[in-house]
């Protein structure tokens, strides 16, 4: 690494959402555009990916859209998932199973409420060397004093319990946002790791309150929580690595109106914006810019490639390097599907996605 150039061995994003249909057509090629060679894809589609056949078929669709990216697949933890299906999935190359507590984020209505009933599935995963990916929140419950700001710390006892029961099961606590989560993963064994998003290295609660474009689940927390994420990256801890949680939503879903909801009445009764921040097309330059801002640029390669690849047992292809150069570049304001660019019937139904950092400058760009 020089002052103006950085070389990184084959970056990997170990948590990304690529949706389906025209949205996949738009965003799947953006994974490579952002500097990523390997993408670990989440299963919360409509309907969710609950079988080996569905997952393999989805990966094939993505590969056809974006042939230059290697996609790894996950299945959705669901009552219909059995140990036998885990064995079939492992044999077919499916790498993990994603757990969503019911109702905590996008397309999680089929999520789980009780982990112990899945112990036979977890045992089969342990034996098959598959990874359990945990969305680390519990559902909000006003009677219990639980809301989006403390839902993650309330979840950590579940992580500890599963790890104690299955110490050889590889577990990833996804998109940590709190010091409590960082401390928890630190004290657990080598089979427990943690992903950190790029946007959580920048945002705090003030940045999404009233600003739908920055709203995601889990939400960004307090300055000290952000500091903990930055500290563990600056340290170079080997079990913390990039999982962008890049989650595209149409602009109309981030800023809903009566036009996009169908009626003013629908807007009044269901006005919440979609949860998700979109970083795929700028991901590695964004990570370089942010890590440099808090004195961790020397840890960039570990964070975006080495640590995650080691945990997932996916070594970088020999000789494959991504080179960044220090050049200021402006992030596009919006990405629009080609089929929608020439439409003149208003923007309400256009497939357009606004990226994180839209209109702002990055300090680094990918060298062609």
Image: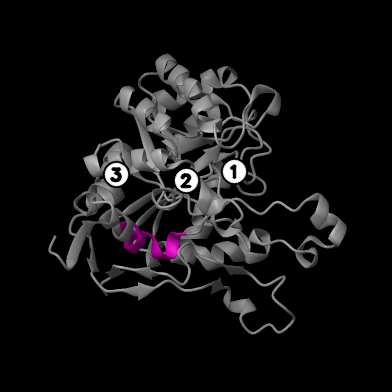
Q: Which residue is mark 1?
A: 49
Looking at the image, is mark 1 or mark 3 earlier in the sequence?
Answer: 1
Q: Is residue 264 above or below residue 98?
A: below
Q: Nearer the viewer, residue 81 or 14?
A: 14
In three-dimensional space, the C-alpha distance between marks 1 and 2, rounded to whole angstroms, equals: 10 Å
Judge left or right: residue 101 versus residue 34.
right
Looking at the image, is mark 1 or mark 2 earlier in the sequence?
Answer: 1
Q: Residue furthest left?
A: 2
Mark 1–mark 3 CB contact (< 8 Å): no
Q: Nearer the viewer, mark 3 or mark 2?
A: 3
Q: Secondary structure at mark 1?
A: loop
Label 2: how many Cα within 10 Å (few below 14, some 14–19, many 20+):
many
Judge left or right: residue 355 versus residue 187.
right
Judge left or right: residue 270 versus residue 18.
right
Label 1: how many Cα within 10 Å (few below 14, some 14–19, many 20+):
many
Q: Which residue is mark 3?
A: 309
Quarter of the C terminus within the rendering:
bottom left
Q: Position of residue 254 (x, y in %)?
A: 64, 59
């Amino acid at each position: 690494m020089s002052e103006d150039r950085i070389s990184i061995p084959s970056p990997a994003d170990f948590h990304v959402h690529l949706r389906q249909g025209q949205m996949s057509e738009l965003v799947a090629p953006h994974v490579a555009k952002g500097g990523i060679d390997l993408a670990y894809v989440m299963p919360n589609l409509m309907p969710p990916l609950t079988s080996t056949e569905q997952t393999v078929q989805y990966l094939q669709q993505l590969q056809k859209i974006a042939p230059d990216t290697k996609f790894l697949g996950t299945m959705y933890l669901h009552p219909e998932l059995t140990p036998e299906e885990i064995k079939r999935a492992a044999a077919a190359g499916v790498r993990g199973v994603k757990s969503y507590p019911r109702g905590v984020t996008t397309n999680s209505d089929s999520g789980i409420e009780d982990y112990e009933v899945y112990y036979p599935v977890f045992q089969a995963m342990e034996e098959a060397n598959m990874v359990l990916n945990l969305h680390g929140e519990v559902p909000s419950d006003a009677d219990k004093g639980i809301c989006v700001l403390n839902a993650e710390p309330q979840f950590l006892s579940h992580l500890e319990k599963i790890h104690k029961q299955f110490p050889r099961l590889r577990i990833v606590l996804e998109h940590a946002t709190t010091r409590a989560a960082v401390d928890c993963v630190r004290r657990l064994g080598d089979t427990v790791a943690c992903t950190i998003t790029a946007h959580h290295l920048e945002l705090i609660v003030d940045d999404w309150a009233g600003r739908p474009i920055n709203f995601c689940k889990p939400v960004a927390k307090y300055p000290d929580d952000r500091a903990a994420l930055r500290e563990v990256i600056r340290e170079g801890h080997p079990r913390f690595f990039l999982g962008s949680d890049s989650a595209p939503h149409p602009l109309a879903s981030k800023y809903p109106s009566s036009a996009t909801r169908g009626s003013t009445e629908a807007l009044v009764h269901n006005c919440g914006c979609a949860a998700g921040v979109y970083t795929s097309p700028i991901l590695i330059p964004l990570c370089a810019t942010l890590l440099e801002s808090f004195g961790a640029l020397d840890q960039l390669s570990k964070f975006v490639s080495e640590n995650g690849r080691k945990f997932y047992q996916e070594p970088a292809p020999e000789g494959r390097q991504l080179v960044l150069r220090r050049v200021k570049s402006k992030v596009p304001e919006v990405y629009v599907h080609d089929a929608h660019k020439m439409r003149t019937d208003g923007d309400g139904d256009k497939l357009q996605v606004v990226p994180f950092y839209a209109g702002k400058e990055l300090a680094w760009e990918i060298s062609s």
